Amino acid sequence: MAKLKNAVPRKRDIALDGHRGLHRKGSRKDKVHKTFDEAGPDAAQKLATEPGLAEATYPNWRTTFRRQADTAVPVVKPARVAVNVSLDAALVAAAKELDVNVSRAAESGVAAEVMRLRGERWLEDNRGAIESSNAYFDRRGLPLEKFRMF
């Protein structure tokens, strides 16, 4: 079946690209946006300025490229610190056998423990407020309780 040149695209033929709006997959605009994401504004600008682009389109893209390049947030990797840790030899051997990254596993375990302890500390610090709030509702009941259906 031949495609009509000016046919309205179906939803499956359209790519939703965040703040950039709707455009056809594989279209020039799609290629320019992908180039911008993968290679940066200069490469996208070079592709966008090739012949055949509508006259008003390029200035709009150029403004978008500049704005995005100016507001781009650099990706920063978290700082790593070397730490000596003593672990059970059998556990380390089993981890190596299973191709476990011991550093990442230890990091996730430490992160879970830190989160747990912060939660406990928060509960302890706010115990008075929580008890006061519970006592208030014990005395007065829930607001709008008479409208509850259960």
Image (cartoon, grey):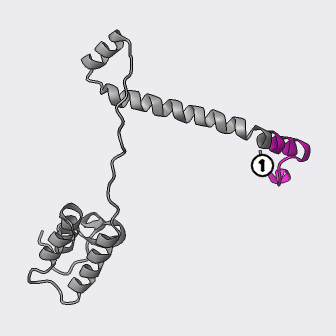
Q: Callout 1: helix, strand or loop?
A: loop
**Residue 14 seen in the figure:** yes
Q: Position of residue 52 (x, y in %)?
A: 10, 84
Q: Position of residue 127 (x, y in %)?
A: 75, 37
Position of 39 compared to 50: left or right? right
- Residue nearest the viewer, comparing 104 with 56: 104
Taking the magenta stretch, the answer to whether it contains residue 81 is no
In the image, which residues are magenta?
Answer: 131-149
Residue 42 occupies which quadrant of the picture?
Answer: bottom left
- Residue nearest the viewer, comparing 99 with 86: 86
Position of 121 compared to 142: left or right? left
Q: Residue at x 26, y 19 (%)?
A: 96
Residue at image mark 1: 149
Please, what is the three-letter code of the amino acid marked with disc 1? Met
Taking the magenta stretch, the answer to whether it contains residue 137 is yes
Q: Position of residue 136 (x, y in %)?
A: 86, 45
Q: Residues within 10 Å of mark 1 (few under 14, many from 20)?
A: few
Q: Main secondary structure of the magenta part?
A: helix
Q: Residue at x 34, y 52 (%)?
A: 76
Position of 39 compared to 149: left or right? left
- Residue nearest the viewer, comparing 134 with 14: 134
Q: Position of residue 150 (x, y in %)?
A: 77, 44
Q: Residue at x 28, y 81 (%)?
A: 63
